[in-house]
Structure formats: structure tokens, C-alpha cells
Amino acid sequence: MDNFRSRKAQFAIEFSMMIALAMVALLVLAGVLYFMTYDYSEDRNIRRLTDLGYSLQNELILANQVEDGYERIVVLPDKVESAQYSISKVNNDLVITYRSAELLFPVPQNITGAFQKGTNTIHKISGVVSIS
């Protein structure tokens, strides 16, 4: 009878250890998957913000090259997908900031004003491109 209880106890301990090992392996796998999806999500957000920056850069280059009287309305969303961002113009660069990343897009020199989230109008008057 003592041998039977000893075997039962040993089985219970081994079973508990296997369950604990499986739980640790599951937690490690969940952590790895979380970090992989987080990195993918961050890369996707940066790609989308880069696309937005190139689109705005192309709009400003086009406005600079066409005749006076050019006008275009551009709407900037509050978020790109789920990414909060900020946009500004520093010297001759359009700067999109997302978390710790700053994406720079060179723009022509004769541009006044800056983009804001929401509705923006690009005008070209007397050879000067303005954003309002």
C-alpha cells in the first residue's frame, strides 16, 4: 500500500511539473508572438506615414512647378490607421513625427505656412506656395 501511495505522489508531482513546463513554454511563445506582431505593426505604421509624407511632398513640388492660381485642398487625418503623429515644417523640410521617429521630406524653399491635421489648402500666388 505504501508503494502505491508513493507512485501516486510521484505521478502527481511529475504531472504538475509537466503542466508548469507547458505553461512556461506557452508564455514564452505568447511573448515572442506579441513582439513579432508589435514590430510588424510599428513597421506598417511607419510605412503608411512615409507614404503620407511623400504624397504631401509631391503636392508641394507640383504646386511649386505650376503657374500662379494653383489651389488644392488636402485633408490630413487625425490618425493614420491607429498611429498618432504630428506634422510640421522645419526650414525646407516637412517633418512627420511618430513616437521617436522623425521622417523628413525635403520641400521647395518658397513655401509658407504648415500643414495641420484636418483640411488644408495649398495656394500658389505670385510665385509663392502657401499652406493654410
Image (cartoon, rainbow, N blue to C red):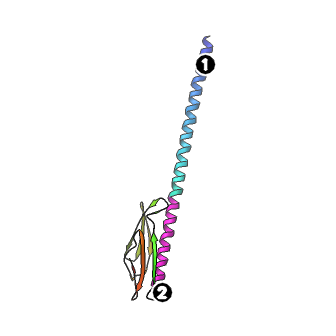
Location of residue 99 (image quadrant): bottom left
**Dominant secondary structure of the magenta stretch?**
helix
Q: Amino acid at mark 2?
A: Val
Q: Residue at x 56, y 28 (%)?
A: 16
Vertical placement of residue 113 versus 36, above or below: below
For disc 2, the neighbor class at 10 Å (few under 14, some 14 to 19, many from 20) is few
Q: Of residues 16 and 81, which is closer to you in this image?
A: 81
Q: Which image quarter is the N terminus in?
A: top right
Stretch in magenta = 42-67
Q: Which image quarter is the C terminus in?
A: bottom left
- Return the x and y of residue 122 as percentages of the image width and height: 43, 79
Location of residue 123 (image quadrant): bottom left
Res. 8 mark: 1
Q: Which residue is mark 2?
A: 66
Q: Of residues 76 and 105, which is closer to you in this image?
A: 76
Please, what secondary structure does the residue beneath circle 2 have?
Answer: loop
Q: Earlier in the sequence, mark 2 or mark 1?
A: 1
- Return the x and y of residue 118 as percentages of the image width and height: 42, 69
Label 2 to label 1: alpha-carbon separation: 87 Å
Please, what secondary structure does the residue beneath circle 1 have?
Answer: helix
**Image depth: mark 2 or mark 1 in front:** 2
